[in-house]
């Protein structure tokens, strides 16, 4: 287990004003955690756009995000292994893929009102950055990484389990938003010995708010197009159409 980093390690963390400290204390209360270094928590909220626009030498949260992703994966994998001995590796992979997904982490972030605390640049603010799922999910991973460094693996495990175990039970009860791309690929591989092929048919709407229209081709048969706010969502929507047709 790593020792907590010295405060000098956080030299790139954005400065914490008295008002900001009150805001971060509110987040700690909502998340039921406590940071020894409030500067490290502030760094976890520092988006690249904020760091780029800052007049001071400010770091962003991407290294913490990288670390937090690994800690998250280990904690979830360990919980699955210890608590669900009747399931196999394939079951673990499917459950984990949902609970650590962008959708799942963004939902957790919204419940904790992470969007209220993120530090973002003016351009990102103007384009609706606070509500972007990818930005929220990345920030959540950065918080996990920061808490691991600040308070150790045991504390990080407790935080992640408190937030993620309910998501695991949602999957076990089959009430989750399904990953239709994975379901379709597994189905097509098994039945047709091939892979789905996705094509973006068109993009509509203004540049900052595109709608992507995607079709999926399987055995020369086309399904869709279906729409999404980004390419990934469009692919999921097209995969849902194809899976529901083929699996019948």
Image: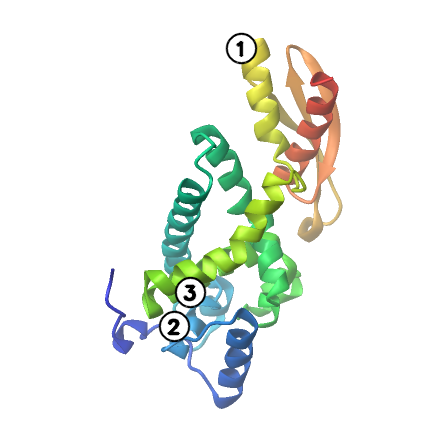
Callouts 1 and 3 close, C-beta under 8 Å:
no
Within-10-Å neighbours for mark 1: few <14, some 14–19, many 20+: few
Which quarter shows the C terminus? top right
Helix, strand or loop at label 2? It is helix
14 displayed left or right of 115: left
Up-down: is 118 above or below 107?
below
Which residue carries the number 3 mark? Answer: 60
Q: Nearer the viewer, residue 25 or 56?
A: 25
Which quarter shows the N terminus? bottom left
**In this rendering, which labeled residue sits more in front, label 1 or label 3?**
1
Real-space Cα distance between discs 1 and 3? 44 Å
**In this rendering, which labeled residue sits more in front, label 2 or label 3?**
2
Q: Residue at x 45, y 44 (%)?
A: 83
Q: Position of residue 92 (x, y in %)?
A: 47, 36
* Residue 101 in view in this figure: no
Which residue carries the number 2 mark? Answer: 40
Q: Residue at x 47, y 87 (%)?
A: 17
Which residue carries the number 1 mark? Answer: 193
Q: Residue at x 61, y 38 (%)?
A: 232
Within-10-Å neighbours for mark 2: few <14, some 14–19, many 20+: many
Up-down: is 127 above or below 82?
below
Sequence order check, earlier mark of 2 and 3? 2
Q: Position of residue 217 (x, y in %)?
A: 65, 18
Q: Nearer the viewer, residue 221 or 153?
A: 153
């Amino acid at each position: 287990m790593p020792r907590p980093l010295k405060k000098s390690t956080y030299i790139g963390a954005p400065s914490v004003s008295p008002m900001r400290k009150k805001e971060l204390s509110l987040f700690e209360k909502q998340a039921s955690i406590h940071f020894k270094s409030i500067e490290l928590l502030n760094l976890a909220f520092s988006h690249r756009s904020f760091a780029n626009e800052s007049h001071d030498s400010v770091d962003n949260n991407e290294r913490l995000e990288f670390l937090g992703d690994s800690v998250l994966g280990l904690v979830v994998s360990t919980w699955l292994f210890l608590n669900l001995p009747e399931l196999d590796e394939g079951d673990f992979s499917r459950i984990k893929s949902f609970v650590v997904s962008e959708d799942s982490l963004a939902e957790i972030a919204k419940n904790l009102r992470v969007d209220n605390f993120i530090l973002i640049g003016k351009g990102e603010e103007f384009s609706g950055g606070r509500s972007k799922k990818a930005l929220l999910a990345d920030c959540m991973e950065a918080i996990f990484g920061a808490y691991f460094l600040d308070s150790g693996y045991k504390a990080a495990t407790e935080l992640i389990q408190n937030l993620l175990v309910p998501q695991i039970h949602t999957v076990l009860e089959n009430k989750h938003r399904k990953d239709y791309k994975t379901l379709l690929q597994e189905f097509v591989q098994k039945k047709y010995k091939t892979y789905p092929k996705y094509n973006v048919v068109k993009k509509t709407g203004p540049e900052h708010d595109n709608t992507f229209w995607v079709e999926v081709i399987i055995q020369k048969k086309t399904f869709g197009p279906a729409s999404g706010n980004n390419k990934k969502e469009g692919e999921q929507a097209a995969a849902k159409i194809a899976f529901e047709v083929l699996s019948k």
